[in-house]
Image (cartoon, helix red, strand yellow):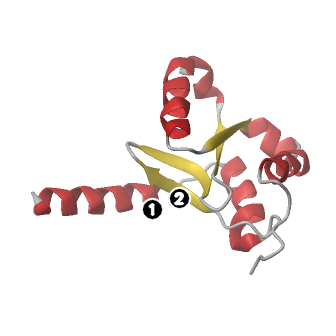
Amino acid sequence: MTKVRTLHRVATIQRARDLRRNDTDAEARLWNVLRARRLGGWRWKRQAPWGPYFLDFLSVEARLVVEVDGWQHVEQVDYDERRTRYIERSGLRVLRFWNHDVLTNCDGVCVSILNACDGERGDAG
């Protein structure tokens, strides 16, 4: 049993790495803002494994998940709703933005994220 868990963990880590290497333009732009505590001092992870899913961006401190969706999500509404319910049962909140919104209004997206995080952290760093 231990070997199966180890193989699963290795596969999960590799999948997360692959997703990070192949991010969309919108994910790359948002990550550039979120990384290194650049947005309000909050710490973020990208393509974080969470149960059977990979979360685009996760702030454990803020208990917030940010998903950046492309047009394929128009056709998978039921899947996204199930995924969101699963994540929310874990005590996390989920914000979703379209790629287009991140690319054309990144400042507005960041304000929404910062508001959902309850503003800037006073103890950042």
Q: Nearer the viewer, residue 36 or 121?
A: 121
For the image, the number of numbered tags is 2
At horizontal 54% and vertical 48% (from top left) the residue drawn is 55
Q: Secondary structure at mark 2?
A: helix
**Residues under labels 2 and 1: Cα distance?**
5 Å
x, y (%) of residue 49? 44, 53
> In the picture, which quadrant includes the C terminus?
bottom right
> In the picture, which quadrant includes the N terminus?
bottom left
Q: Residues within 10 Å of mark 2 (few under 14, many from 20)?
A: some
Residues tagged 2 and 1 counted as in contact (Cβ below 8 A): yes
At horizontal 58% and vertical 58% (from top left) the residue drawn is 46
Q: Nearer the viewer, residue 78 or 40?
A: 40
* Residue type beneath disc 1: Arg
**Mark 2 = which residue?**
20
Q: Vertically, is 86 above or below 51?
A: above
Q: Position of 35 compared to 5: left or right?
A: right
At horizontal 78% and vertical 77% (from top left) the residue drawn is 123
x, y (%) of residue 16? 44, 57
x, y (%) of residue 8? 24, 55
Q: Secondary structure at mark 1?
A: helix
Q: Quadrant of residue 95?
A: top right
Q: Vertically, is 61 above or below 82?
A: below
Q: Residues within 10 Å of mark 1 (few under 14, many from 20)?
A: some
* Residue type beneath disc 2: Arg
Q: Vertically, is 72 above or below 20?
A: above
The numbered dot on residue 17 is 1
x, y (%) of residue 20? 53, 59
Q: Position of 3 compared to 97: left or right?
A: left
Q: Position of 3 compared to 25: left or right?
A: left
